[in-house]
Amino acid sequence: MVNQEDPRVLRTRQLIREAFRGLLRNKKFDAITMKDIAQRATINRSTLYTHYEDKYALLEEITEQVFHKMIPEQVLNAQEFTDEICEQLILLTHRYFVTFYQICRMESKSIDTLVDEKVRKMLQQIIESIFIKGNHHHIADGHHTKIISAMTGSAIYSAAHYWFMVGENDRTDLLVDIARPYVTNALRQYCNGDEYLNDPSMRP
């Protein structure tokens, strides 16, 4: 088994990721092979397979790393899903699309599907973590927490993705104005306007 903390392993994995990013800028994902990645990283294929099962595992890791590096500390430490936290998640998700698709070309359905599933899942996990840390009695049941987190994350993802796809990238203020009330009002309605959203601006 590969020792993930070994400096040589870390350097090799970084080399592989950089090679993969370079290929994504100039070549469709579906056309990239593990041989291409190994050649660009100047390693043999057996070494590449030691670190990554396939190019999908590599893409998933890069997707996750890019997203996590962009999460603000305020969101990571949040214990309430406030208006401000919702806004930051919307902007984060939109900014992620802009950043990620500067790395790779968008013609691949494989990329779209994998990124869609991964980002939705990461948003759900972030939101679920906020709810759990806040110890909200409204959604004490674990299944409720996951469902509400999934729906909230999906709404944020869909709004940010649509905004990116239509090219309105200079009007993120309008994106927030449209998406934030939709998300926070839905949560407020679910929780009957109680202290679930601990934000005075959201109270009736």
Image (cartoon, grey):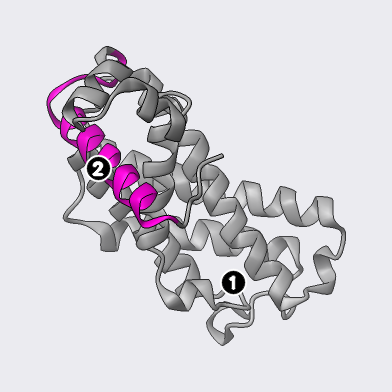
Q: Quadrant of residue 41?
A: top left
Q: Secondary structure at mark 2?
A: helix
Callout 1 amino acid: Phe
Percent position (x, y) of residue 60? 44, 37
Residue sitting nearer the eye, 161 or 62: 62
Q: Quadrant of residue 108?
A: top left
Q: Which residue is mark 1?
A: 81
Percent position (x, y) of residue 51? 43, 35
Q: Is residue 180 above or below residue 107?
A: below
Residue 115 visible in the displayed image: no
Q: Residue furthest top?
A: 31
Q: Secondary structure at mark 1?
A: loop
Q: Which residue is mark 2?
A: 15
Please identify the dominant SS of the magenta region: helix
Residue sitting nearer the eye, 59 or 10: 10
Span shown in magenta: 6-30
